Image (cartoon, coloured by chain):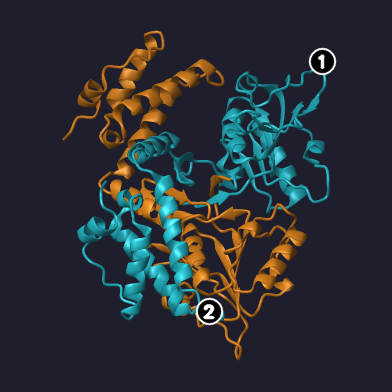
Chain colours: A orange, B cyan
Amino acid sequence: MVSLQLAHQLDNKNVLLIGGGKMGVTRLKKLLPVGSKVTLVSPRFDPSISKSGMFPHQLPSQDGEKVIINADWRHQDEKTGEETVQIYKVIQDEFKEEYFNLDGEEEYWHLILVCIASDNKSEEIHALAKKKYGNQQMVNVADKPALCDFFFGANATLGGGLQLMISSNGISPTLGGIVRDEITRHFQSMDFDESMKRLGDLRVKIRKATTNPSGPDKPEDIQYRMRWIKTATDFFGLKNCERIDVEKLVALFLEMRADNMSLKFASPEEMVATYAPSK
Amino acid sequence: MVSLQLAHQLDNKNVLLIGGGKMGVTRLKKLLPVGSKVTLVSPRFDPSISKSGMFPHQLPSQDGEKVIINADWRHQDEKTGEETVQIYKVIQDEFKEEYFNLDGEEEYWHLILVCIASDNKSEEIHALAKKKYGNQQMVNVADKPALCDFFFGANATLGGGLQLMISSNGISPTLGGIVRDEITRHFQSMDFDESMKRLGDLRVKIRKATTNPSGPDKPEDIQYRMRWIKTATDFFGLKNCERIDVEKLVALFLEMRADNMSLKFASPEEMVATYAPSK
């Protein structure tokens, strides 16, 4: 069955990752860039966790401290001001039920991820999580589709705040990755930041120009705005959005709105030549 | 902040949709094709819900039955055998806390979606859901990013079981939709079903050819297989995967494996000419 793909806001949210091997590392690479507050439980740790700086302290070991908290897990570079997100807490141990516990009543696990080799132990953790937090608790057990509320996919950022995911629903991650790479190559030359800025600008200015000062906006106005913007941007196509002249387009919108809320545009070629000319 | 995009398995899972207006309809269009068991609560219903066949019975009304269950919500066409998924249950009313209740202890809401005009009422439902099911309950309130655990994006299916999502993280759904359309156009001529079949075949046959009969596979074998397939498919590129000769490639794999687990391939041009010739 196909999936419903959703974009999770994980900023500052607790995620429990059980298993610090190679598969656990692939999860960390997805979790840390989106700002999630990761607790990692594992008896052993893949060397890349230290080497990559995902955890800046010495990892806990059998002989020393078992639990180490990285208080400065959202680390801001003093020079560049850039933020890197690291693992929040590491527990060196086989998983035990008590490691589910979080400080504070409001606290919860947004996601629970299991990446260990033992099938029995995986099933046990899955059952415990569902029992403790209800079936609504989102759990993913690596390589066990029947124990997954959701799957990971091949992700990429395209610029302009746009993100891409290709899901193969577990059938062929290889093909998913190839499609992802082909798409990022295809869009490499496009300036999504600029397109996003101009389209956002256009939307705000058109909304402002037609806001009803004495109450909520009329439904016909909201609908016309939406249809106008959609039709206009379809005419331009993706390549040209980064060059649209926002002021000129707002003027065109007001003119067409005054003309009985018209949706009759010039030809795509004329539209591009007039409102998104090549430099 | 960027999102983590995940693919949710919603087949037969309960989803609560509060609000049957235009926005509610856009949610239904995403929920039904993935097989989710939708309960819709709304005092009024957009006409397209009946017209589109999403709910085949007369919708409940103020004067008649308030709750109608569509027992045959997974409807199989007798002639074609094709399955269509319809709304499971419709409650004609403003939302009340009792509508959270499900039959059976094991039951739960995988997602709770709120699509109503009133800000106060939206906030109230969000708070109730989190109180009743814990903060781990996934909730999305339309047009209220602060009350969303996740966002919807622009989705498409690419064939071969592959699915695409573009997320704009609420900044520009228009641009997200344009990018989605451009990508589906770009891949229109490609036969993903065939590529998926051949790559899957290749993986299975290579695994079979190198399975350790006397225990679990050796890590170096697993790693070599993965690296070989990845390198080979990168050489072919997406366009040519639908034509790869699986038998010939398995032979090449065994030859290179015998040669000290080599990863030295011929040039991409030669690889394509020999192992994925144009018809």
Task: Check chain identity for marks 1 and 2: say if they share one.
Answer: no
Relative height, residue B96 to residue B231 (above, below): above
Is A202 left, or right, of B99 in this rendering?
Answer: left
Q: Residue A262 or B27: which is nearer the viewer?
A: B27
**Which residue is label 2 attached to?**
A45
Q: Nearer the viewer, residue B85 or B167?
A: B85
Kind of element beneath mark 1:
loop
Q: Which mark is residue B63?
A: 1
Image coordinates of residue A264 in percent, x first then y, are 34, 13
Q: Which picture quadrant has residue A60? A: bottom right
Q: Is label 2 in a helix, a strand or a loop?
A: loop
Asked whether B249 or A208 is in front, the reply is B249
**Residue A109 location, quadrant:** bottom right
The quadrant of the picture occupied by the C terminus of chain A is top left
Q: In the rendered structure, are the residues bearing label 1 and label 2 in contact, judged by CB atoms less than 8 Å apart?
A: no
- Residue at x-position 32% and y-position 74%: B256
Left-right relation of B174 to A171: left
Q: Position of residue A138 (x, y in %)?
A: 65, 55
Q: Residues within 10 Å of mark 2 (few under 14, many from 20)?
A: many
- Number of marks drawn: 2
User: In the image, what residue type sits under mark 2?
Assistant: Phe
